[in-house]
Amino acid sequence: MDPTRHTLAITYGTRPATSAELIAAFQGLATSTIGNVLDDLGIGGIGLNLRPVAPGMRFVGAALTVKEVTGAQHAYLASEFGLGAVVDLCQPLDVVVIDNGGQQVSTWGGVASVAAVQNGTAGLVVDGGVRDADEITELGFPVFSRHVVPLSGKTRVKVIEINTTVKIDGMAVQAGDIVVGDASGLVVVPLARAAEVARLASELERQDRQASDEIRKGLSFTEALRKFAKL
């Protein structure tokens, strides 16, 4: 391998500011509820194939996007892995969103998770692989991925873009978009529509709670469906 053919150059995009207040508006909202709103509005952004590494993982935050390429072992220099640049950028309430093209190779592990927690990172989404699942679970760092594999990404994976538009699980994700993950799955809310989606989802969640309360008091499920059309 000729090192002169390799470069650590990473293309950086510009990430718009996502307010803490806007992120907070999604706290406590279920992905199922948010997904109903996204579906009704024709926005998309409902993930189907990425799952939490362990039960009980949940996060809400703003996307810090990462694009990677993957090759055979020794395709890249170990120094080109680039994950340090990603973790060093992480701030509180960020969700790292990595587009690795669904590859069955690890691009994230336990030590990176420790560093991310130290930075206040809210969570991680990888359309690809992660490893050190036991360590991540013990740490309590919320991670969603397509694969959990022991295969190292060193010399196989290279970061090429940060805070550009990426694609995960068929969904386009822009830097700053709202990302929510829970036991049901993953949703991505475009920043430009986030306030509207949060408002509608909050109202839908209120109706769900009211319907459940009335069913506990004797209302039949059929009657509830008739009364609360958005269930």
Image (spheres, rainbow, N blue to C red):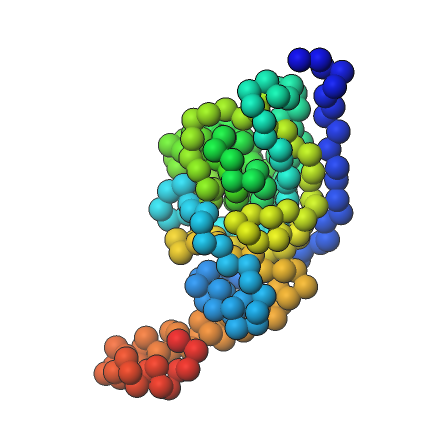
Q: Is 220 above or below relative to 40? A: below
Return the x and y of residue 96 as percentages of the image width and height: 58, 43
Residue at the left extreme of this rendering = 218
Give the camera-side residue of 170 and 117. Answer: 170
> Residue at position x 56%, y 40% from top?
101
Give the camera-side residue of 204 and 11. Answer: 11
> Residue at position x 69%, y 44% from top?
163
Residue at the top extreme of this rendering = 2
> Residue at position x 74%, y 23% from top?
7
Residue 141 shows in the view = yes
Return the x and y of residue 77 as percentages of the image width and height: 65, 19
Give the camera-side residue of 91 and 45. Answer: 45
Q: Is 226 left, or right, of 44 in this rendering?
A: left
Return the x and y of residue 84 as percentages of the image width and height: 63, 29
Quarter of the view holding residue 80: top right
Q: Quadrant of the N terminus?
A: top right
Quarter of the view holding residue 66: top right
Q: Is 136 left, or right, of 172 in this rendering?
A: left
Residue 198 shows in the view = no
> Residue at position x 55%, y 52% from top?
170
Return the x and y of residue 149 as percentages of the image width and height: 42, 31
Q: Is 133 above or below relative to 72? A: below
Q: Is 229 above or below relative to 77? A: below
Give the camera-side residue of 206 and 151. Answer: 151
